[in-house]
Image: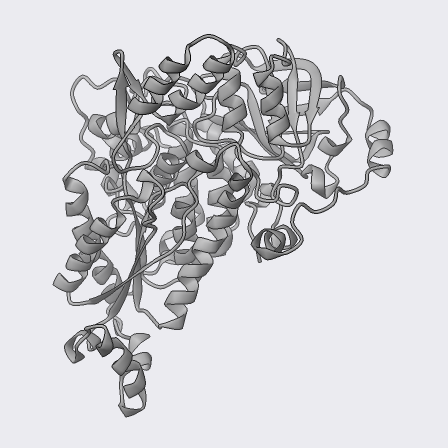
């Protein structure tokens, strides 16, 4: 089907009455010929704070060239970004998840306000990726998302490093295991140039998930930021969005329930970040597709863990790309009968056709064959129980333990938990509980990488457990459970916990429980009083009033 590619911009620009609008465009260099073509938004997240988005302006220029070559007029604009790796462990981290909503809202406002005909979004840092896709799903105009690419791994003493190694080196330093000059050397060698965190952390997880979803062209996101081919695929994205526009293909035609299940399968097969649960639930909500937290467990149970990736494995995102990337993972899932092969993608080909075109690098060890998976099931599990009636998320990639029983160590702020780890106050067998860090209680649902990195660095990663109504970085590994819902600030059972209460994790039974009777939990919660809001005005207070449960994707509106 061919549609009018100027269906929206024609209203904005055509006819004598629209002369005032045209004169503004002409003031910044657009011509009448430019204004006679479809207006294509090219939105990116460049900010002088982080390598994650450092290449976005360069990629935007290439996207714009592709749009012009295909007969459109590109309109470049930017949105915001909060960099988790910088904000982690501070009050600033509360703004991270909030920024996802701001990204989506800001794109919608610009696109709706100027009647743009289509959009290409260039993402980088963790929350910019789902934020852009949420906006595309919400607006439902032709568009796609291109990820700026993974950073190259660093090297030091024969090790390939990511930012994960820096966080864990902090823990090792605080535990007296390495000297300060060793910490500084790791800091200086871990990250080089443009690109987002180098393991299968949240940015690369969502990048791969959205290739599987079909809203990003298969194989494009995986091209590393420093690879010259990144500019080539950016140019192709500019041409591709014009094709989508002329054919009238919109995001909601692509973001279906089956496509979301494909995305979940991609996350499980690669041992991806638990944040994928939040973000895919949020995208489904924006697209009007029914998806629940339980769907993640259903897909995980049937999906083998195939990719040997950091934070728990051996390899980085760059090495996965070199091995064959997500097309190869998709091919594995197709061969296993675990892919809804007929789902559309923005390339015009189905996900099954994209998978069939995969190329495997001979001798690669990153993506396992179906005959020898790392695990027979996926990289995360949904638990419920008397501590998490609405569910919580456990990352089980690289885990051999399936149970943990131990005394609760209660902290009402991430900083207090980090201080306890640093001071050596956490002991083998303990269950660290960090609460009032949920979507409302934080507000903003901070990631706990500072704490989990410190635990790993101190050598406690295999002997303690951690649960929180906050969330985890994709770089987190160990026996960790996040997104506990209802959260403490919503009178969830986690608010009833006291120091030394016995908490039991059982992965096989999908349970998270405290050894207390229902009557005792009810009695304690009856005496519970909500803490004073940490913010009473501004964006954080607004978010706390509007945000939903983590079990629903922590969405606003």
In-image side of 252 versus 157 (left or right):
right
Quadrant of the image for the C terminus? bottom right
Q: Using the image as rendered, state which of residue 95 and residue 14 is in the foreground.
A: 95
- Going 56% across and 15% down the picture, which residue do you hit? 402
Quadrant of the image for the N terminus? bottom left
In the rendered image, the residue lying farthest to the front is: 181
Q: Is residue 394 above or below residue 459?
A: below
Residue 139 makes an appearance in the image: no
Q: Is residue 248 above or below residue 194?
A: below
Q: Using the image as rendered, state which of residue 169 and residue 126 is in the foreground.
A: 169
In the rendered image, the residue lying farthest to the bottom is: 16
**Res. 121 image quadrant:** bottom left
- Going 22% across and 25% down the picture, which residue do you hit? 323
Q: Position of residue 497 (x, y in %)?
A: 75, 27
**Res. 229 image quadrant:** top left
In-image side of 9 versus 474 (left or right):
left
Total numbered circles = 0
In the rendered image, the residue lying farthest to the left is: 69
Q: Position of residue 71 (x, y in %)?
A: 15, 67
The colour scheme used to paint the residues is one colour
Residue 103 makes an appearance in the image: yes
Q: Position of residue 214 (x, y in %)?
A: 32, 47
- Going 30% across and 34% down the picture, which residue do you hit? 330
Q: Using the image as rendered, state which of residue 470 and residue 416 is in the foreground.
A: 416
Q: Position of residue 324 (x, y in %)?
A: 22, 29
Q: Is residue 383 above or below residue 2?
A: above
- Going 28% across and 33% down the picture, which residue do you hit? 151
């Amino acid at each position: 089907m061919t549609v009018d590619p100027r269906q929206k911009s024609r209203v904005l620009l055509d006819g004598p009455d629209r002369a005032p609008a045209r004169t503004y465009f002409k003031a910044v260099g657009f011509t009448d010929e430019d204004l006679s073509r479809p207006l294509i938004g090219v939105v990116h997240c460049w900010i002088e704070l982080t390598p994650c988005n450092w290449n976005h302006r360069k990629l935007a220029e290439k996207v714009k060239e592709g749009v012009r070559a295909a007969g459109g007029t590109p309109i470049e604009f930017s949105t915001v970004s909060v960099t988790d790796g910088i904000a982690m462990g501070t009050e600033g981290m509360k703004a991270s998840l909030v920024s996802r909503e701001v990204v989506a809202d800001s794109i919608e406002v610009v696109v709706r306000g100027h009647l743009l005909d289509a959009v290409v979004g260039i993402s980088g840092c963790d929350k910019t990726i789902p934020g852009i896709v949420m906006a595309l799903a919400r607006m439902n105009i032709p568009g796609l998302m291109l990820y700026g690419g993974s950073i190259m791994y660093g090297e030091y003493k024969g090790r390939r490093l990511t930012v994960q190694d820096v966080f864990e080196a902090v823990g090792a330093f605080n535990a007296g295991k390495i000297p300060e000059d060793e910490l500084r050397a790791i800091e200086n060698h871990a990250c080089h140039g443009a690109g987002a965190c180098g393991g299968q952390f949240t940015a690369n997880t969502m990048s791969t998930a959205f290739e599987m979803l079909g809203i990003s062209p298969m194989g494009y996101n995986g091209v590393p930021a420093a690879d010259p081919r990144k500019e080539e695929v950016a140019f192709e994205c500019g041409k591709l969005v014009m094709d989508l526009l002329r054919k009238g293909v919109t995001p909601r035609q692509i973001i279906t329930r089956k496509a979301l299940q494909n995305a979940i399968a991609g996350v499980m097969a690669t041992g991806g970040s638990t944040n994928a649960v939040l973000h895919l639930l949020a995208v489904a909500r924006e697209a009007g597709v029914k998806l629940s937290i339980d769907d993640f467990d259903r897909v995980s149970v049937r999906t083998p863990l195939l990719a040997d990736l950091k934070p728990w494995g051996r390899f980085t995102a760059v090495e996965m790309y070199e091995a064959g990337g997500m097309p190869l993972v998709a091919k594995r899932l197709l061969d296993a009968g675990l892919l809804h092969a007929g789902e559309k993608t923005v390339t015009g080909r189905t996900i099954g056709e994209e998978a069939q075109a995969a190329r495997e690098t001979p001798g690669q060890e990153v993506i396992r064959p179906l005959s020898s998976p790392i695990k027979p099931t996926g990289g995360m599990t949904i638990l419920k129980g008397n501590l998490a009636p609405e569910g919580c998320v456990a990352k089980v990639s690289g885990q051999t333990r399936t149970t943990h029983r131990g005394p609760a160590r209660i902290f009402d702020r991430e900083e207090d938990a980090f201080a306890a780890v640093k001071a050596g106050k956490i002991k083998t067998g303990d269950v660290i509980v960090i609460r009032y860090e949920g979507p409302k209680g934080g507000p903003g649902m901070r990631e706990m990488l500072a704490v989990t990195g410190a635990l790993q660095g101190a050598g406690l990663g295999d002997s303690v457990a951690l649960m929180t109504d906050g969330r985890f970085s994709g770089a987190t590994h160990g026996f960790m459970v996040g997104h506990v819902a209802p959260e403490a600030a919503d009178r969830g059972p986690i608010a009833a916990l006291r120091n030394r209460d016995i908490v039991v994790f059982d992965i096989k039974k999908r349970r998270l429980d405290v050894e207390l009777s229902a009557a005792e939990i009810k009695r304690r919660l009856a005496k519970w009083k909500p803490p004073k809001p940490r913010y009473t005005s501004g964006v954080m207070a607004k978010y706390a009033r509007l945000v939903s449960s983590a079990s629903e994707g922590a969405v606003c509106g």
